[in-house]
Image (tube, rainbow, N blue to C red):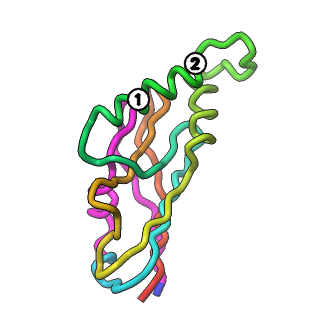
Amino acid sequence: MWVQKEISLKPRPRGFHIVTDEIVRQLPELAQYSIGMLHVFIKHTSASLTINENADPTVRMDFESFFNRAVPENEPYYAHTLEGSDDMPAHIKSSMLGSSVTIPVTKGQLNLGMWQGIYLCEHRNHASGREIVITLQGD
């Protein structure tokens, strides 16, 4: 059995945001699967997805601090600058973290670890909502 759909995530400020529940709410079909895989893909080049700590918000703050330091804005060697000082760093951060995650499905639920959640990594200062493609396969 296969399901594929596009969903929208609400706009968020720059930073790392847990979106697991927002994704699951828009995927009622998940409950029908006893075993499977969920692939989540973001259709943007200035935001990314990853899986990490879902309990302590300081982890998300530290992610933002690290990536801002590792990939700073306003570097003189950036040629792609027409869309603002945050744009080129956003593309680099997105490539570093990736555009998709894959999660096992067990008994109608995402089989994440107790302290894991799906992060939307928003790298732009003023982003709109983000479009996600969800592909669910299994029995």
Name above or below for residue 18 compared with residue 69: below
Q: What is the distance, in whole Å, between disc 2 and disc 1 at their CAs?
A: 14 Å
Quarter of the image that includes the C terminus: bottom left
| Residue closest to the eye, 31 or 83 | 31
Disc 2 target residue:
72
- Residue in view at x 38 percent, y 75 percent: 105
Viewer-nearest residue: 76 or 114:
114
24 vs 76: above or below:
below
Of tags 2 and 1, which is closer to the observer?
2
Quarter assignment of residue 95 = top right
SS state under label 2: loop
Q: Is residue 22 magenta?
A: yes
3 is within the stretch colored magenta: yes
What residue sits right under mark 1 in the picture?
A: 14
Q: Which percent across, then down, holds residue 25?
A: 26, 63
* Region of the chain picked out in magenta, as a range: 2-28
